Each structure stands twice: as structure tokens, then as C-alpha cells.
Image (tube, coloured by chain):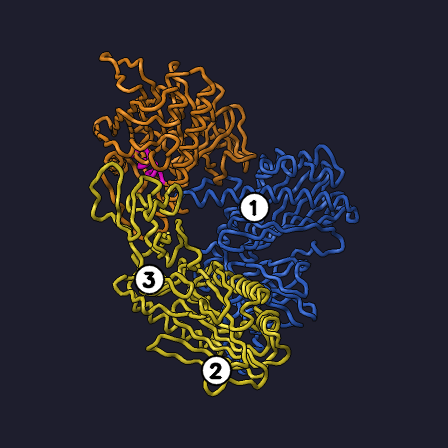
Chain colours: A yellow, B blue, C orange
């Protein structure tokens, strides 16, 4: 049983990670080679030479103009995966071609399509516009997780854990105590989870960045677009300050916390995180503070989820968890993921590892 | 085929290891959480939160009075495993309960019952009274073994290995050369192995602690109560000095070497060892010497048994050992263990790891 | 499906590695104990005591004259594997005997026969006479490979990789560009691959050792005697200088590059390499240069092949490589190995590891 769906867009990297040099990352068990072409677009092809499977990202493999030359026997490939030269002969076998992955670079992310390329629709790449919007300032990073993708989905869909795992950072008693509402849009493929705390303690993460203190309004509106993209629309305001009827909300501070969750293997995950704010955009000290705090929070999650993966590995088959009200969002996400897994094309075949 | 029996008492820790703080140890593939309650008794419950399997021993999980609060979402449990609070709701699901393990603290050890709790009889916990008896002074420790439990049983039931593996410490030529007698009490569940050396070299372990030198009487009487508890009643005396007819034995030195062998996993073992003596009880230098010497001897066993576990992992299936007279005790122990395994309840189900 | 054939001679060590002390190495999944007897011959027996499988190479196991005494219980074995003493009894069980391996020491190598000893014919051990011939000076070494044996066979049968993987050392453009001829002698069990470059750049490896510069003749004649022994007859000469009709070749430099490829396990290999030359035999600086250069080249292969083994572990079952003209020699070698595997006796049984 796969732990993630295929025929989906996944974030492979930040655009800033990929320049005109060889870069590889494993996404959904597939080792992929990336580079930014001289024209400026990102290319993604299989990282395994068709001849004797040498990793094209490993020296002495090299990028020459916009072609990659295998470091073992010199097989040479263009950015679209087509083989352009082999050693010792001029005829190039027809089958000599690297798998090429559909790529979209958008909202600071490099998205790749994992699955049947015929089904890839660039218009359906989920959006996180705040990350490159002039009205927002963003800090971001990525932390690798030695735990399966689904454990991170569970984690982010149920923020009651902030009170316990992230106490002193973003957790206060009200998060765990306030009930949530969950809504599922099957057609759009979105899970919504909301928790509106109208009279809550202001955690350090927000007091130090907004200047608010004491009791505040704190709204958390989650929008999860399975499998990969998650946004927490976080609204922080003085007590009683509501959005205007026209939708504008000048009295509040808005933080868009974005996660892109990408399976590396069946039991490891790339955890991309970004925090975009619509206030103090020019204040570097606020950027530094939020970057450091959010990274700390992510590393608390990493430690917890890595422990869960070890628990799973050691537990008897068929072990059953117990779920309660706080899990409504996470369970809705699991159901939607199960449908996507069922609907997606099959993996090339089980890896042997 | 399991490598150890269930429905048995096993030593999980020394009592001194467990205070009013969270402590975990894996026993027979089960991760168990211990703490000493404010009333002073030791409690043992499953170390896995029923909600999302977070390890209750891992920070920020915390002990609050006599309740443990899960560091992930705040599920709270009393010392008997009963859930007393969950986040975001007042109703506590009936199934929210940690597995609770029967515990007996006795003879300096904390024993837990692994298997069907209905069968646990605290009166049947095996005894090692010397470890806390006023007439004895005891040194003790624990060394982890990356080898299956059964290899340690083999090791301790056949002390002829002292001559080779522990030469210069407790081994002399007479140990390997002197025949043993083996007796099995099926009803009591005890294997007895005796080796009485009436004229033997005194090894450093005993010469330095007793002051005897040269030739001595050295009796080794093993009493093994499968699966966990092993005692070597060691009697050291000048040549020809025998116990009195009334059972008293004032002319001899008595050392009770106690081992508790507890499977951690199918291929690793907790090796608890203790050495109790009825002489020089107040002499710290003798205590220090025996502690250091016995630990060295145990580490020699650890190195040997770890190597055997590697041999087993690399050898073809169905490899056959060859046994000789010295193995009579070990083979009797294996037969008794096989019966206990057959009789015991089944494990929750095979671990996936 | 085994990855190497049995009923074959394999190089276990250089003769210089084995003195009058215990030495062990795993060959074809079998841990073997070696020592040089007082009479000077090399003996090879199973490294596992028949009693409780203790490794006879591990202290406190010890060599006493020409017998090995097990460090666990003192089982004692002669050089032919026969048990000569057991503890606590005088009768030695008939089955107490270590597996003994046929051994031939020749051409600086210690060869062992893996498989059915009845089929071992010392006269059929492949020869590499240059390694101990007075007309040649030799440098040699061994590098362990965390990759299956077959990947090293592929590597050495297709030297076009020199141009890419070993550029700046032994590779020049002409190697990859010059076509090969392949010949198979099924009866003798030899694969021949030749590449005669009559006008080629002289790589540093040869220019610094021979003093030749600029354009040279460079002939590569491979002789592979599956499974273990590989020789590259390398002939370097000024442009147009050919061997004489009588077979003598005074105007050329000859280098015999010898590899012995020995499976350690299914996915690791002992990579013995030697470079023998018929020029500058007394010049230590040439020896040092060739030793350092060839070791560097071997380590470049090791890094590449270790990466391939990881690729294999992560790839889907049934992944297909693509082969071209340069692979003719390697594919011929694979076919011959497949026949040897089919013809060889079965392994004792699958290892459990």
C-alpha cells in the first residue's frame, strides 16, 4: 500500500536552490536531476544514466552548456532528456532517453509532476501567492524528516499540538481548548479546518513580531490542498477588532504559514516551510526572529515525527490509534489522500530496497 | 518462532534506576514507561500514547504529580494507565487507556510481567534475597547485549568457558576440566548444574577478595529459574574444609553471583549482574575490586556474544551446532525454555521492524 | 539468483598478508580463517567453531604452534580442520571438524577454492606470472568495494570509462573513441577485448613513468579469465614502433595491470590490483608514482561502483539497462559468468542476513 499518491504535483525545491549546475533530489522514491538552463528555466530529468545507471549528479558527471555528460562513460543528454552522444559510435540508440518530468516554477517553488506525464496540467499547480507578493515579506527553509509524509499531514491538520509540543513558541492553552470546524470541498480537493480564538493569550511568536501583548483575537484558518500544499491563514488582532464588511482587514496582522510536504521515500519527507507576513515587511529583525522561531518549531515537529516513525517500525502489525474531535481535520485529509492514492497511476514497481 | 517466552516475570530495572521521573526501557519488544509514584511504588505502563503513538518518555512529555502528560497533544494518564484528560473535549473515550503491567519490586530488582496480566502471580516472582540481605555486601550493574537472550543463557549455563574467555579473571584450567552434574526440577522449573572442584587453583577474582592463595576448594552450584533469573552459588574454601553437618559453613567464603537476563528485542538483551558476598562486607576496596573485575568479565561475555549474534546473522539457514558433555546444563535450559515458549501466550503479533 | 559462481578459485589475500598468526577474510559469504603454518604453507579453514560458532579469528582465540584454540570454550583444531581437543572430556566427536578449503599460493596471491572440494584442481589456478617475475617490478594493493562483484567486471571489461571517470590519470579522448574487438574462447574460458590506439595522446600515468610524451602508440589487450582474474596487457610505444616478427618487442614499454575480483558478500567485493612493468624496474620513484596513481584510479572506480550499488538498491525491480558497442566485452563476460553460475554447485543455502 503506497504512502503517497502519484499523478500529483509536488514541490521539489525552492527556485533559489537551482542554478546552472547539477542538483539532485529524491521525490517520491525517484532520484531527479535538476538544473537551470541558460535560458533560465528549470529542467528535471531522471538522475540515472540509461547505460549503466551512474548518477548524473555525481562527479565527474558535468554540465556542459545545457547538456549533462555522464561521468562514467560520457553518455550525453540534452535538457529534455534526449541522448545526444554516446562513446565509440555515432548511432544513438532510440531508447537512449532520460525520463523527463513536467516542471512548473511558481510562488518561489519548483514543482514536479510525479506520475503519468500525460496527465500533468500546469494550470492545476496549487498556489501560494503570498510567497512572492510585494505586499508580503517571507522567510522560509526546508527541514528533512525521517518520517513518512502522512505523519506530517496529521501534524499540520491538528494544531492542538501547538499547546504541548510548541509551548513557549506558538502554543497557548487556548489552541488545544478551542473547538475546530472542519469542511471538505471534494470537487476542489481542499480540506478546511478553522479555529477562531476570540480571546486568547498572545504567544511570543506573535507578540514579539506584532507588538501586541496580553489577550488577543487569534484565528487559524487552514486550507490543505492534498497532497502537497498546506496554508495556515493566521489572523492576529486586538480584542474585538473584526474584518470590515468589504473584506478588508486593516486592523489585523496577517501571517500566511505555508508548508509543502513532499515524500522523499516511503518513510522520509522534505518539509518545506515558509512564513509570509503583511506587516513590518522591511524590518529585518522581525524577519530574523520569525525565521529562527519557525525553524525551531519545525525542528520540534521533526523530533516528534521521527519518534513516531520509530514507534511505527517497532509496533505490532495492525496496531490501532484512537482518534477524538481534534482529529476531524486530519481524518478528512487521510480520506482524501486515500482516494488520490487509489486514483493515481501505479508506481513503476515496488523498489527493492 | 519466538526467542523468549511470554507470561513470565522479567527484570526491567534496578529499583535505584527509577525515581519520580519518566524512565523507559524496552522489554520483550514492548516499550514500557516507568516512574516511582509519590507513594513510593513503581508503576509500569505502555510508553505509547493511545492517540498518535507519541513516546510518553520523550520530552516535552512530562510527569505532573502522578500523571503523565503526552508531549504531543496533552493526553494525560494516571499511574494505572487510565486516561484522565484529552484536549478540546471533556468526554474521555472509554478505550483511552494505556496497557498497564503488573510490577513487583523485590531483591533490588523491578520485575514486570510480560504476557497475559490475568496470569501474573506476584508470589511467583523468583527470589535473589542476598542482594538486599544484611549479611551480604553487593555490587551490581547492567550491560546491554546486542545478542539474543538465548546466547546469554547458553553462556551462563556452561561455565567451562571461564577457563578460556575469562582466563586471568575467574578462569583456571580446573573449570573446563572438571565434569558437571546436571539436574532438572520440572515442577519447580529449575535447572541445577554443579561443578565441585576440590583442589583447584585460586583465580585472582577470589584470591584478592578472600586472601586465599594457591590451591583451594571451589564449588560452583548453578540454579537457573527460566527464563530470567540465574544464581551461581560460589563456595571458596581452604583445601579440605567442608560445610558442617548442620548446614552452617563458617570456614568458607560464599559469593552469590546473580544474573537477570531480560530480552530487549529478539536480538538484544539487558544483562543485569550482581555479586553478593558474605565476607569483608564493610571493605570498600573489596567491593570496588569485585565490581571492576565482574564488569570486565561481563564485557568479555558481551564481546563474545555480540560476535555470535553476527555469526548467526551471516550463516546459512539450518546451520547445526555440535554439543558435548559440558553442554548438558545449557541443553536442559533450552528444553525448558522451549516448553515455556510453547505454553506462553502469543505476542501481540509480529513486529514489523 | 547468485551473483557469483561457485566451484571456482578466488584470490583471498596476498601471500604477504598471511603470517604465523590468525587472519580472517570473508570470501563468497564464507568467513575463512587463514594462517601460515610453521612449515610455511597457508592453511584455510572455516572461521566458525563447530561448538557454539565463536569466530576463531577473534581474541582470545589463539594460535598455538599449528593449532587454533577457540577463545570461548577451548575447542582446538589442527591446520587441516580436524578437532584435536575439547573441554571436559577425552572423546572427540567425529563431526567435530572445520571445513577445510583447498589453497594454492602462486604469483603472490593466496587462492582458495569455493565450492565442492572434490572438484578443486590446483593445476587450473589462473596465472599472473609477471607479479613475481624477475623481469618485472610490481606495485599492488587491495581496496574494498561496497558493490557487487559483477559491477567491477563490467567496469574492467569496458575501458572506455577511462576517458571520463579517469580523465587526467589514464584516460584520454582516444580510449572512448577507438572501437574494440572482442573474442571469446569458450573452451579455455577466456574473454579477450582489444583496443589498439596507433596514434594517441600519452596520459600522465604513462608519460611520467616511461618518459614518452605527446603522441604514442597505446595498445590495450584484455584477457579475462572468469570469474576472478583479469589482466590488461598494456603496450606503450613511440609512434610507428611495432613488435618484431619474432615476437620480441624491445622498442615498447609493457605494463601488466592485474585485477583479482573476489566477492566478499552478494553486494561487496575485494578489489585486488597490481601493476607490473618491464622498465625502470629499479627506480623507486616510478614505483611510488605508479602505486599512488593506480590506487587513485581504483578509488575513483570504488566511488563510482558504490554509487551504482546504491542505484540498484533504490531502483524498481526489473529495471533495464541500455547497452551499446562498447559493452560487447562486458556482455560476453556476463554470459560466461551466467554459465559458470549455472554449472557451479549450490551455496550451502541462502544466508539469513
Q: Give the residue number, with chain letter if any, for mark 2.
A: A248
* Marks 3, 2 in one chain: yes
Q: Residues within 10 Å of mark 1 (few under 14, many from 20)?
A: many
Does any portion of residue B251 appear in the rendered image?
yes
Q: Give the residue number, with chain letter if any, for mark 3.
A: A113
Q: Nearer the viewer, mark 1 or mark 3?
A: 3
> What span is colored magenta in the figure?
C148-159
Q: Give the residue number, with chain letter if any, for mark 1.
A: B157
Q: Is residue B26 left or right of residue C333?
A: right
The residue depicted at 50 percent of the width and 33 percent of the height is C57
Quick one: which residue is furthest to the bottom in this view?
A245
* Residue A180 % position (x, y): 49, 81
Q: CA distance from mark 3 to mark 2?
A: 36 Å
Q: CA distance from mark 1 to mark 3?
A: 62 Å
Q: Quadrant of residue C115?
A: top left
Q: Nearer the viewer, mark 3 or mark 2?
A: 2
* SS for dot 3: strand
Q: Quadrant of residue C208?
A: top left
* Residue A332 % position (x, y): 40, 76
The residue depicted at 22 percent of the width and 30 percent of the height is C181
Does any portion of residue A31 appear in the rendered image?
no
Return the chain for callout 2: A
Residue C149 shown in magenta: yes
Q: Is residue A236 left or right of residue A17?
A: right
Residue C275 shown in magenta: no
Amino acid at each position: 500500500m503506497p504512502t503517497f499518491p502519484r499523478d500529483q504535483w509536488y514541490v521539489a525545491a525552492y527556485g533559489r536552490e537551482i542554478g546552472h549546475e547539477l542538483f539532485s533530489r529524491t521525490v517520491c522514491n525517484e532520484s531527479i536531476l535538476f538544473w537551470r538552463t541558460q535560458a533560465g528555466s528549470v529542467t528535471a530529468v531522471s538522475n540515472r544514466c540509461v547505460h549503466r545507471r551512474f548518477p548524473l549528479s555525481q562527479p565527474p558527471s558535468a554540465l556542459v552548456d545545457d547538456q549533462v555528460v555522464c561521468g562514467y562513460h560520457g553518455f550525453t543528454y540534452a535538457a529534455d532528456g534526449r541522448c545526444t552522444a554516446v562513446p565509440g559510435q555515432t548511432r544513438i540508440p532510440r531508447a537512449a532517453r532520460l525520463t523527463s518530468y513536467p516542471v512548473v516554477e511558481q510562488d518561489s517553488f519548483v514543482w514536479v509532476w510525479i506520475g503519468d506525464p500525460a496527465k500533468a496540467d500546469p494550470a492545476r499547480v496549487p498556489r501560494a501567492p503570498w510567497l512572492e507578493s510585494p505586499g508580503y515579506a517571507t522567510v522560509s527553509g526546508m527541514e528533512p524528516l525521517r518520517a513518512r509524509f502522512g505523519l506530517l499531514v496529521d501534524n499540520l491538520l491538528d494544531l492542538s499540538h501547538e499547546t504541548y509540543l510548541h509551548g513557549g513558541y506558538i502554543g497557548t492553552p487556548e489552541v488545544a481548548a478551542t473547538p475546530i470546524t472542519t469542511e471538505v470541498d471534494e470537487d476542489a480537493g481542499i480540506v478546511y479546518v478553522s479555529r477562531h480564538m476570540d480571546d486568547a493569550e498572545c504567544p511570543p511568536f506573535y507578540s514579539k513580531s506584532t507588538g501586541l501583548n496580553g489577550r488577543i483575537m487569534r484565528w487559524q484558518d487552514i486550507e490543505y490542498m492534498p497532497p502537497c500544499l498546506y496554508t495556515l491563514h493566521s489572523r492576529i488582532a486586538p480584542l474585538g477588532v473584526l474584518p470590515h464588511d468589504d473584506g478588508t482587514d486593516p486592523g489585523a496582522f496577517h501571517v500566511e504559514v505555508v508548508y509543502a510536504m513532499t515524500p522523499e521515500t516511503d518513510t522520509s519527507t522534505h518539509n518545506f516551510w515558509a512564513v509570509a507576513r503583511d506587516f513590518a515587511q522591511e524590518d529585518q529583525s522581525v524577519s530574523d526572529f520569525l525565521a529562527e522561531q519557525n525553524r525551531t518549531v519545525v525542528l520540534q515537529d521533526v523530533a516528534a515525527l521521527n519518534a513516531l516513525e520509530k514507534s511505527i517500525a517497532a509496533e505490532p502489525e495492525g496496531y490501532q490509534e484512537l482518534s477524538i474531535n481534534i482529529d476531524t481535520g486530519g481524518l478528512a485529509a487521510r480520506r482524501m489522500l486515500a482516494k488520490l492514492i487509489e486514483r493515481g497511476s501505479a508506481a513503476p514497481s515496488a523498489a527493492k530496497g
